[in-house]
Amino acid sequence: MDNKIQINSAGKIFTTDKQDVVALQDVNLSVGANEFITFVGASGCGKSTLLRCIGGLETLSSGEITVNGRAVQGPGVDRAMVFQNYSLYPWLSVVDNIKFSRRLKVNREGATSAEVEVASGRADALLSLMGLAHAAKAYPNQLSGGMQQRVAIARALLPKPEILLMDEPFGALDAQTREVMHDLILHLFNLEKTTIVFVTHDVEEAIYLGQRIVLMAPRPGRIDTIYEVPLPDKRNQEMKLSPEFIALKKEILTRIRETSGMHTDTDLLEQMTRQAEGSEAV
Ligand SMILES: Nc1ncnc2c1ncn2[C@@H]1O[C@H](COP(=O)(O)OP(=O)(O)O)[C@@H](O)[C@H]1O
Ligand SMILES: [Mg+2]
């Protein structure tokens, strides 16, 4: 597999008035071309920060991230991001939302009408691929959350990015809609041959989608364990019931609990309860 993203000794420190937060410490990882890699871990372990650094929306404090061998120095058309909040333009129709980024680029570079037409053709293709053809003229506030997120994904895919960076994109959707989105995104992944880096707090989602899962741990934010997903590339919902799936889910959930500091919290809680009971008895 060709190397698409390379992360070398990446570090990120946020300095606030109260204290410094080590959001990333010595993160090393290679992501292959056309790999689907998922990130899980307790809240605050640096998942979003790492994704934003790959996207060029945030700069590292130390180390380096390269894409196709070139250091990331800011956002680029080779990388597209999709967030949990769909961030559509409410005043534009579905089809215009999808074409919007391309239109900005076209205006800036004075592209020919042929190029604009190619973009229009792709917008239409993405509309049908996403099952949105009937809603092309609708406005975002007329759509369900699942449909809005499909528009956001279509918009991200329009300029044919090599890398799709997704930060909890389905976090706001109900369970059934999320399942539909999972199969849709896997279908897109096979069709478009993109590289996908997908952040989630849902372990089942991480296993179902990912070929590898990176488990991060907090304070300092770092990579704890990388798991290979022992499932065939072509996934179906039935696999969620397979022994391999369930065993991996259990293993990852246990490890997240161990690394999140939640153990110590429950220990502390028990200790406090015992103390409270003790003082009542006196
Ligand atoms: N802009 C920021 N300023 C200060 N601290 C931040 C900022 N962004 C993130 N952090 C801190 O960095 C750590 C990692 O955050 P984040 O990457 O959002 O974690 P995750 O996405 O895994 O929940 C957290 O402790 C968070 O509070
Ligand atoms: Mg986050």
Image (cartoon, grey):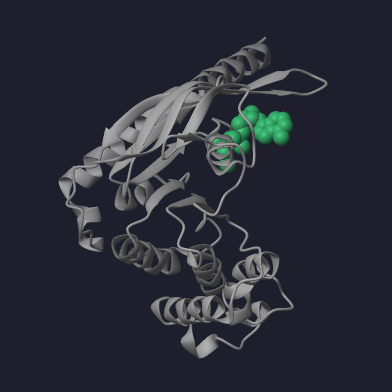
Give residue 232's position: percent from left, percent from top.
Answer: 17, 52
* Closer-to-camera residue (217/140): 140
- Is residue 118 depicted above or below 239 in this figure? below
Q: Is residue 83 left or right of residue 31?
A: right
- Is residue 116 depicted above or below 280 in this figure? below
Q: Dividing the picture into quarters, in which one does residue 254 lie? A: top left
- Is residue 138 depicted above or below 22 in this figure? below
Q: Quadrant of the C terminus?
A: top right
Give residue 208's position: percent from left, percent from top.
Answer: 30, 52
The residue depicted at 60 percent of the width and 37 percent of the height is: 73
Q: Quadrant of the N terminus?
A: top left
The residue most toward the top is: 282
How many numbered circles does the render carry? 0
Give residue 234's position: percent from left, percent from top.
Answer: 20, 59
Give residue 201's position: percent from left, percent from top.
Answer: 48, 44
* Closer-to-camera residue (63/170): 63
Q: Is residue 138 left or right of residue 218?
A: right
Q: Quadrant of ligand 2?
A: top right
Residue 21, visible in the rendered structure: yes
Q: Dividing the picture into quarters, in which one does residue 240 lie? A: bottom left
Q: Dividing the picture into quarters, in which one does residue 43 lie? A: top right
The residue depicted at 80 percent of the width and 19 percent of the height is: 18
* Closer-to-camera residue (108/149): 108
Residue 43, visible in the rendered structure: no
- Is residue 253 depicted above or below 238 in this figure? above
